[in-house]
Amino acid sequence: MSRRAAILAVNAGSSSLKFQIFDIGSGEPRRRIRGQMDGIGVSPHLTVRRADGGVLVDRAFDPSEVAGLPDAIATIEAWLKTLDDVHLVGIGHRVVHGGPHHDRPVRIDGKVLEELRVYQDLAPLHQPNNLAPIRLAMDLVPDIPQIACFDTEFHRHRERSRDCYALPLELYEEGVRRYGFHGLSYAWIAEAMKTSLPDLARGRVIVAHLGSGASMCALHGGRSVESTMGFSAIDGLVMGTRSGQLDPGVLLYLMQHRGMSADEISSLLYHDSGLLGLSGISSDMRVLEASDDPRAALAIDHFVYRAVLNAGMLVAALGGLDGFVFTAGIGEHSPVIRARIVEGLAWAGLRLDPDANDAGHGRITTDDSPVAAFVIPTDEEMVIARAVMSLVGA
């Protein structure tokens, strides 16, 4: 059996592990297989599909079988070994935080891995999980190049006046600055607009990456102007279990009057806040939308309010608005949330087309809406595959 050169793109999150295999040759990487292990430690489920949608694996596991990310990695690795016709020439990994020194994809060695480990405290839900598959792959297949692709890269060209905090400048040089995240997603949307919406791609656009992790980015000519996330992946919008923007005085209060330690505060802000903290029910927007509990309504109301409020900030950063894009889990799949955000931005020129919004793809505003809104699915793994193909010279 002939073996085809391929790239593996890995996207490890806090409770899921996504991967895709791309055949490569001349031109664009060609998606071959898409897979995901969801519900790690709670209700693990592995789904693998061919590019045409055909199901290769659809299997649920007992939580004890896939109790954590290492188990998920081992399960997927075992399945990948059954693919006799795949010859991997590179493995690309989503890494949330690149710190102040990494502004482009990089081949990983021991030195780079140690540099990235330092930023685990800035993205504790993601960075350790991002690095775990890298370490395992370096041990199992040391001869295959490993490439790190950074969520912070997309925002790195912004002016210092936009990225600094009003703190002593030595802290900025040390790395205390506004990084912005979800950059792989924003890079995909910016590139997709160039092809399907070229006029809009040259203009002023807000992209709302709304999922368990959520942020918004202001793009002008496809480049990041401002984003809602800053120094860490906890800033900005309300998220599934993360608080979003918070007055630092709250942290001082928790330390001084509640006697909470740094670890306890970190656990509160990253694991017990956001939609879950406000509702006391779930971090999943689908569960909250289906609930008649008033606490669920409160969490949704607050999510929408903060999203509209932050969009107003980004309009100011852009000096106006030409378009709005929804992407990621909630952005792509919740017509209710999209409708409420669009209606909250009526002042900015958005007019919802209810039927188009219910359909959930393409343009969701009326033809005469001064500002057009769209739903565009994100594809972070394709961005990773392109970077790997470029670096390994395949």
Image: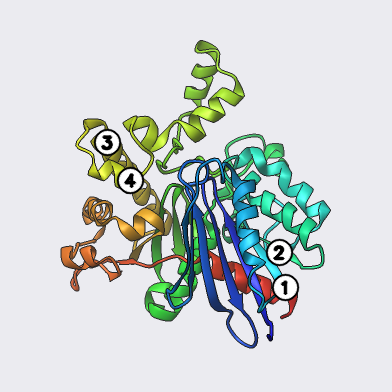
Which residue carries the number 4 mark? 285
Q: Secondary structure at mark 4?
A: helix
Establish if 261 lies above or below 178. Answer: above
Establish if 369 lies above or below 274. Answer: below
Which residue carries the number 3 mark? 296
Specify which label sits upstream in the sequence, 2 or 4.
Answer: 2
Nearer to me, 275 or 184: 275
* Numbered disc in front, either 1 or 3: 3
Q: Quadrant of the N terminus?
A: bottom right
Classify mark 2: residues with Cα within 10 Å, few (<14), some (14-19) or many (20+): many
Query: In terms of image quadrants, where is residue 335?
Result: bottom left
The kind of residue on which mark 1 rests is Leu
Which residue carries the number 1 mark? 391
Question: Marks 2 and 4, how far apart in space?
Answer: 33 Å
Question: Marks 1 and 2, how far apart in space?
Answer: 8 Å
In the image, residue 193 lies at what x, y percent? 42, 74
In the image, residue 339 lies at what x, y percent? 23, 55
